[in-house]
Structures are given as structure tokens and as C-alpha cells.
Image (cartoon, rainbow, N blue to C red):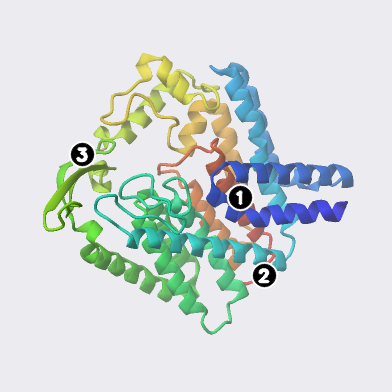
Amino acid sequence: MKFNIHYLSLLLIYSLPISLMSGPAIPDITITLVGILFLIYAFKNSDFYWLHIDWIKAGIIFWISLILISFFSINKSSSFINSLIFIRYIILSAAVYYWLITDDKRLKVLLLILFSTIIFILLDCAIQFFRYDPLIGFGPDIFGRLPTHYGRLTGPFNDQVPGSHLSKFFFISLFLFLYFYKNYKYTKIIISLYYLSTGIIIFLSGEKMAVATFLLGSLIFIFLFKDYRKLFLFLIITLFISILAIIKNHTSFNDFKVIESSPHHLGLILQKEYNCENNKKLKCFKEIKLQPEFISVLSNFKESVYYKIYSTSYKMWLDNKITGVGLNNYEEVCKNNKKYKFLSKNYGNCSSHPHNFYLQWLIEAGIIGFLMFIIFIFYIFKSFYKSRHLYSSKIGFISLIIIFWPIMSTGSLLKNWHGIETFFIIGISLLLSKKLSKIKS
């Protein structure tokens, strides 16, 4: 019984990188089953040592604080439901860290699966990019599915998230070559091609935050890994040159003129030129709306939708400082109170969430929940201190910096897909700090 439970859970974890491409439902079922099986194992074997690990204790205290603040929330039922089921994320991280990946062999299998899924995503996105048509934007992927928004890549996902996914998992998957294939004669060539193709696809995805975090991770990597410093400096320069070459030569960057550029939501309006369907000798035109340029948002931040969201969030927190409005209550509170509504061109009155992990906890869980979250993050990063000299620990540290870098727009941790990705990475990253792989730099 013990073996079957463990083996089944291991297979489920191995399948998670693949199921994450299918949307939120299957991964959520997967991690819920893993959590249940882990708890069955713990009770059956009276193995509760994992509850004494500092970061897990901090995570459970954080979870309890979310339940307690729900008594004071605006919509209590929504807050209670979201706070109660939040424990599945913490148990996911604990199961990966403590129970499932217990040796290098299992770690290697997990990393090989992760690497394979990333390669598939890169190829699928590349197919969309090379099938570009000015009329429809990027073309169908290997399954025949079109991107959901003009000018954005989706790859095998049902949303505009391939860039975010790649930036989060790239450095963890890179450990496969830094350790398991370190002495293979083609390793540096593979790393180079892998880095450049990932960086290019992240840029082409149109996800600005993914580009920023990928470059942030690259800079930290250069600082921490002295023996790969020259290689990665060369790769970053090559990446920029490659991107400039694509911008100059690919049709998607040269078949339009700018009609309007503003920092508002969908504030970049372009006129696309293409051959008319009925008469290829004639030119037809199509007007499309895209997300504003990064520079436009920075230079006119107060006019951007991000400023509207963040300023609304701040007002909401001022009225609910201690316990917040309740988990997953942000949008409802905003819609039901005129003082929180904001007028933003092409966007509407309210956002579904504050678009930043830290703001989300501050507003929806108040000072209490926010401080418990900060303590949880502190103990996560504290786990890396003793093993900071290990290659594995450094890779885990970079991956977590990418996730928890505070100055960026993010998804909601309460949404299944984002929550699963985040806590899956937490589990793997902390696993890498456990000295499973004792490589000194």
C-alpha cells in the first residue's frame, strides 16, 4: 500500500509539467490527489516530521491567518472557500520537497520531463510565429489552434502565458545540464541553443514582464556562476542581436503604421497592410488594438491601467487595513462601491485582482495576512543560506527571485494555474537547496 501510494503520487508529479499546458482543471485535480495521498501516507506512517520544517510551518501559519481574516471579509463564503483550499498549494510544495523527489535519479526524470515540455512549447510557439498572416496575426499551432489575441503567441496553452511559463521554469530545467550532463562534450552548445531559443520565444510572446524576469534571472546567473559568466554574457549579447535581426526582417514588425500610441489598455493602435483576399494585386488595411508599448507605460504611468489598478488597490486597503476585504473579494468590492471604480480607456471599471502578489495579500488579507506572507517568503529564502555554495541551491534561488520579485505585474495566486506553477516551483527550488546534488562552485 505504501509503495503504491508513493508510486502513484510520483507519476502524478511527473505528469504535472505536461498537464500545465492543458489549462487549470487537470493540474488542479493532479495536485489535489497528490496532497491527499501525501496526507494518507503521513497518517498511515505517523510521519509528521515535515510539519517541523520552518518554511512549511510558516506556510501553515499563513494559511491559518487567511482562514481567520475570512471572518471579517466582505463576502465571507468566497473568502472561506478560497482560504480553505489554499492549503493544497503548501502541501504540494511539501510533498515535492519532502516525500516524492528523494534522490538524484527522480530529480533527473522530473527535469527531463520539464525540459521536454519546454522544448515542445518553444517549437509550438515557433510554428505559430512562422505561420504569421497580417490578416489574422500569428497562425495556428501544431494542433491547429489560433492565438486568442492578435500579435500574441499562445503555443499549446489556452491563454497568453507561454512567455511567463518559460521564464519561470527555464533556470530550473537548466540544472539538468549544469549537473547531470555537465561533462558531456556538447553541453555548452546545447545550453547556448536552449538559452537563445527560449529568450527569443519569450520576447516574441509579447509578455513584457516575462522578458524582464528572464533577463533578471540571466543577470543573477552571471553574478552567481563564475565559470559560466563569459558564456552567458556572450549569449545575452547574441540574444539582443538576434532579436534586433528578427525585428528588422520579419513581416510582423514591418507591415504596419502606428495610428495611436497611448499608455491605456489596448492603447497601441496599428494599421496593418496585406494583400486583399479577392484581388492579391491590391492592398487592404486592417486596424488592430494591442497592449501599449512598455516605454509608453513607463513615461505616462499615471495614465496607464496599471496605475488605475494600483491606486484603486491602495484606496481599498486604506479602508480595510487590518484584515483586508477577504480572499478573492477585490473585484466584487470594486464593482459594488463607486469610490473604487476607475475609468480606463478600453478596460472597464474594475480589475479581477490587483495584478501583484504583494498588493493582493495586503488588500485581500490585510496587514495580518500580508505579514504572514512576508514571513513565509522569508523562511523560504532562509532555506538557501546554508547551501548557498551549491549549484543546485543557486538555481533554486534564481527561480524564486523570478517569481517573487516585487516590482512587477503578476497573476493571482488564488487562480489555479498561477498558484500551481508558483508552489510547484517553490517545492522544486527548495528541493535543490537540500544538497541532493552536492556540487560546489
Using the rendered view, name the quadrant where residue 396 is placed: bottom right
Look at discs 1 and 2 and give the one toward the viewer: 1
Q: Which amino acid does label 3 sit on?
A: Ser
In the figure, is residue 319 to the left or right of 1?
Answer: left
Residues under labels 2 and 3: Cα distance?
51 Å
Q: Which of marks 1 and 3 is nearer the N terminus?
A: 3
Look at discs 2 and 3 and give the one toward the viewer: 3
The secondary structure type at the circle numbered 3 is loop
Mark 1 touches mark 2? (CB < 8 Å): no
Q: Where residue 425 sits in the image (x, y, percent)?
A: 58, 52
Q: Earlier in the sequence, mark 1 or mark 2?
A: 1
Using the rendered view, name the quadrant where residue 346 is placed: top left
Q: Is residue 310 above or below residue 440?
A: above
The secondary structure type at the circle numbered 2 is loop
Q: Name the residue under label 3.
A: 262
Q: Mark 2 points at which residue?
A: 438
Q: Where residue 207 sits in the image (x, y, percent)?
A: 37, 50
Q: Is residue 221 above or below residue 349?
A: below
**In this orientation, which residue lies closer to the viewer: 156 or 283?**
283
Q: Mark 1 points at which residue?
A: 424
